[in-house]
Image (spheres, helix red, strand yellow):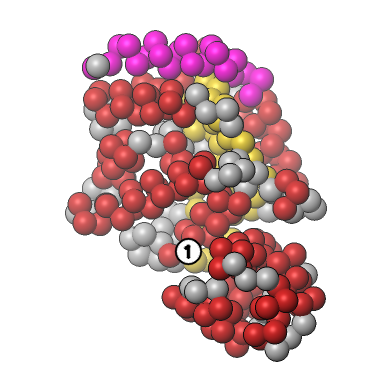
């Protein structure tokens, strides 16, 4: 799936990922600076969005972080961040390598707000549901093609298990609860999975019922990511996609427009307890 984004988003991804990789390797900024024969201020600037490493510094940096296999990808991202057009198209076959852009943002977000207009968000999908969804979306794919895509979706759940998990607000259209992706048994399993997720203190599920009529969510699904203290001056990130590809936006006016839509949908949605009651009611109509 092609993904489109801007150099500014890539820079923020690099900022988040370089810090995460360094901390995962247990290396301090001073040590990195000494190994690369540069100043600690430069390392700090890379991790705060003030500047970018040189392309020639990426390989030794990834070696130091024990992730040499990422060198080619990060070199290309640095080039795109420095010289790319306003919109950069990233293409990868099957499981797109560049979907790691979204995964990096998702794993670092302090709050994730989703409008699930058609299906359950990937972060909250069960494996059978995700498998049926990918199989239906890519009818010509073999099981060998499907498995890594589903594995990737399942790996995203690790963001929910970090020491400081993100706050998740999942706004779900009522129709999604009835859409039998994979048949009644798979949907039943997915609703059980959703109810279990809703029991987590950091996950709130709200259902927008049929009877609210027209609303701004009818334009399609979207995901809003916020980063809190990590990026105090960053407006956040919007992710939307269709069959052709995905798009990242970090324009403050666009973020504000979608944030207003999410707030409106939240006002229209059933309260948390009412949403759970509705999900349980739909679940009782399905196989046990």
Horizontally, residue 10 falls left or right of residue 133, namely right
Location of residue 77 with respect to 93 vertically, above or below:
below
- Horizontal and vertical percent for residue 42? 76, 77
- Horizontal and vertical percent for residue 120? 43, 33
Q: Quadrant of residue 282?
A: top left
Horizontally, residue 228 falls left or right of residue 214, namely right
Horizontally, residue 288 falls left or right of residue 91, namely left
**How many labels sit on residues?**
1
- Horizontal and vertical percent for residue 93? 35, 64
- Residue drawn at (56%, 84%) of the image: 60
- Residue drawn at (55%, 73%) of the image: 65
- Horizontal and vertical percent for residue 100? 49, 60
Q: Tell whether position 27 is magenta.
A: no
**Which residue occupies the foreground of this view, 211 or 122?**
122
Quarter in which the N terminus is drawn: bottom left
Location of residue 207 with respect to 217 vertically, above or below:
above
Horizontally, residue 181 falls left or right of residue 247, namely left
Location of residue 158 with respect to 174 vertically, above or below:
below
Secondary element at tag 1: helix
Q: Residues within 10 Å of mark 1 (few under 14, many from 20)?
A: some
């Amino acid at each position: 799936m092609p993904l489109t984004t801007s150099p500014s988003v890539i820079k923020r991804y690099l900022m988040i990922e370089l810090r995460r990789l360094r901390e995962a390797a247990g290396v301090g900024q001073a040590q990195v600076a000494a190994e690369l024969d540069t100043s600690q201020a430069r390392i700090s600037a890379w991790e705060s969005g003030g500047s970018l490493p040189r392309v020639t510094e990426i390989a030794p940096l990834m070696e130091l972080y024990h992730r040499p296999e990422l060198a080619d990808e990060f070199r290309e991202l640095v080039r795109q961040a420095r010289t790319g057009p306003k919109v950069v198209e990233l293409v990868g076959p099957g499981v797109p390598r560049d979907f790691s852009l979204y995964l990096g943002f998702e794993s670092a977000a302090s709050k994730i707000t989703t409008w699930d207009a058609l299906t359950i968000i990937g972060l909250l999908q069960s494996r059978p549901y995700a498998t049926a969804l990918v199989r239906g979306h890519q009818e010509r794919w073999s099981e060998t093609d499907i498995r890594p895509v589903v594995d990737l979706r399942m790996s995203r759940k690790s963001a929910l298990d970090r020491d400081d998990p993100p706050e998740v607000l999942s706004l779900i259209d009522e129709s999604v609860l009835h859409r039998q992706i994979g048949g009644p048994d798979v949907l039943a399993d997915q609703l059980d999975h959703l109810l279990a997720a809703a029991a987590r203190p950091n996950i709130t599920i709200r259902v927008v019922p049929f009877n609210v009529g027209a609303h701004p969510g009818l334009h399609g699904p979207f995901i809003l990511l916020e980063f809190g203290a990590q990026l105090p001056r960053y407006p956040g990130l919007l992710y939307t996609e269709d069959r052709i590809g995905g798009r990242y936006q970090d324009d403050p006016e666009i973020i504000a427009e979608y944030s207003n839509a999410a707030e409106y949908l939240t006002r229209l949605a059933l309260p948390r307890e009412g949403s759970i009651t509705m999900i349980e009611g739909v679940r009782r109509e399905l196989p046990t």
